[in-house]
Image (cartoon, rainbow, N blue to C red):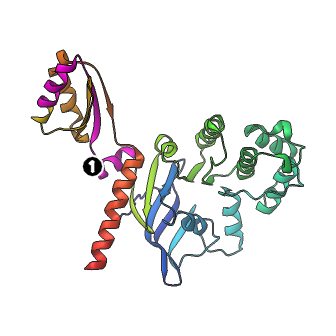
């Protein structure tokens, strides 16, 4: 079982031995992790891995069967006392499916969500939130005419009401085009720079790879691993791919023979180049080898394992471990 044992005084979210059962089915199994102040923390996993269940428990929409979750040091209990209400006002939440009322305008929508959240907003904040997400020009238009991307941006605007200290974003770029995705993360960057902590769940791993400080990998309800992309790559121990463009066709064979003497394998060969599978921990040796072979190549490129490749490798290890445990 992987755990995250951070003991920082700046912990915003703490989950300890969290379990959630639905009848005999275990959706979340003994999960522990922390999220630090001003961190962007990502949850990734296949469908049914337990991401949505964890989100609902952190938002006090679903109680754990056992274990504890705290936000800003306050236990998430679902009670409606003063402490719980104060914590909820510090949270912004963008669900995967944003439910909006078509008859309301964008302005009215934000006022409605502010009332639900229990935060006081004025016309200036309403305009500021709409401007941040590029919807100020349609502030007085009914939501019924909004595209999916516009609805998603309005959903983000409501999550930012009350200047939250903690943002939960569930599949936040769904429905956004590439420019919208870029603008979305630029906005999140600005809020994070102000001190906001961000917890995000997404199946678009290329986005997470570039934009998360730390990542938690879930598989079959269990926490497989937690760490930065670099740390997860080390845990997965996948080889990197090294592309070498040969000086001529005869140099391809020379390069292959030299690399194989070092125990490096060929992944793909072309007429004028070769992809090698190189142990990721031996990058310095690869650079030395390239210098030794510089008369035989024109160009080269190094590609570390992607987050997607790392995810599948670590998830497969966990599935194998669980299968072996069941047999035993």
| Residue that label 1 marks | 237
At x 36%, y 44%, the residue is: 230
Residue 228: in sight, yes or no? no
Q: Is residue 62 left or right of residue 235?
A: right
Q: Is residue 248 left or right of residue 257?
A: right
Q: Dividing the image into 4 quarters, which one contains the N terminus? A: bottom left
Measured as percent of width and height from the top left, residue 106 is found at 84, 47
Measured as percent of width and height from the top left, residue 110 is found at 81, 51
- Whether residue 248 appears in magenta in the rendering, the answer is yes
Q: Dividing the image into 4 quarters, which one contains the C terminus? A: bottom left
For residue 293, above or below residue 25:
above
| SS majority, magenta | helix
219, 268: nearer the viewer: 268
Q: Is residue 240 left or right of residue 71?
A: left
Measured as percent of width and height from the top left, residue 256 is found at 16, 30
Q: Crowding at label 1, few (<14), some or many (≥20) Cα neighbours within 10 Å? A: some
Q: Which residues are magenta?
A: 229-258
């Amino acid at each position: 079982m992987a755990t995250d044992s951070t003991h920082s005084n700046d912990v915003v979210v703490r989950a300890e031995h969290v379990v959630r059962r639905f009848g005999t089915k275990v959706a979340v199994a003994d999960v522990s992790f922390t999220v630090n102040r001003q961190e962007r923390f990502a949850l990734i996993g296949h469908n049914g891995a337990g991401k949505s269940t964890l989100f609902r428990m952190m938002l006090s929409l679903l109680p754990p069967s056992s274990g504890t979750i705290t936000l800003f040091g306050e236990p998430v209990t679902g009670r409606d006392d003063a402490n719980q209400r104060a914590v909820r006002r510090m949270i912004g939440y963008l669900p995967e499916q944003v439910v909006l009322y078509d008859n309301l305008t964008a302005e009215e929508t934000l006022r409605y969500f502010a009332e639900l959240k229990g935060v006081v907003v004025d016309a200036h904040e309403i305009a500021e939130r709409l401007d941040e997400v590029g919807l100020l020009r349609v502030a007085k238009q009914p939501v019924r005419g909004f595209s999916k991307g516009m609805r998603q941006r309005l959903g983000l605007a409501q999550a930012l009401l009350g200047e939250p200290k903690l943002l939960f974003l569930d599949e936040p770029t769904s429905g956004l085009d590439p420019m919208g995705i870029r603008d979305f993360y630029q906005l999140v960057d600005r809020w994070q720079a102000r001190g906001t902590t961000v917890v995000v769940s997404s199946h678009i791993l290329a986005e997470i790879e570039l934009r998360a400080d730390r990542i938690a990998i879930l598989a079959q309800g269990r926490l497989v691993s937690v760490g930065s992309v670099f740390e997860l790559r080390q845990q997965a121990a996948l080889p990197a791919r090294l592309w070498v463009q040969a000086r001529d066709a005869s140099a391809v064979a020379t390069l292959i023979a030299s690399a194989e003497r070092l125990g490096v394998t060929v992944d793909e060969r072309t007429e004028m180049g070769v992809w090698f599978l190189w142990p990721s921990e031996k990058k310095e040796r690869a650079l030395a080898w390239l210098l030794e072979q510089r008369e035989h190549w024109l160009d080269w490129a190094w590609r570390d394992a992607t987050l997607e490749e790392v995810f599948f490798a670590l998830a497969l290890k966990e599935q194998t471990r669980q299968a072996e445990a069941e047999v035993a």
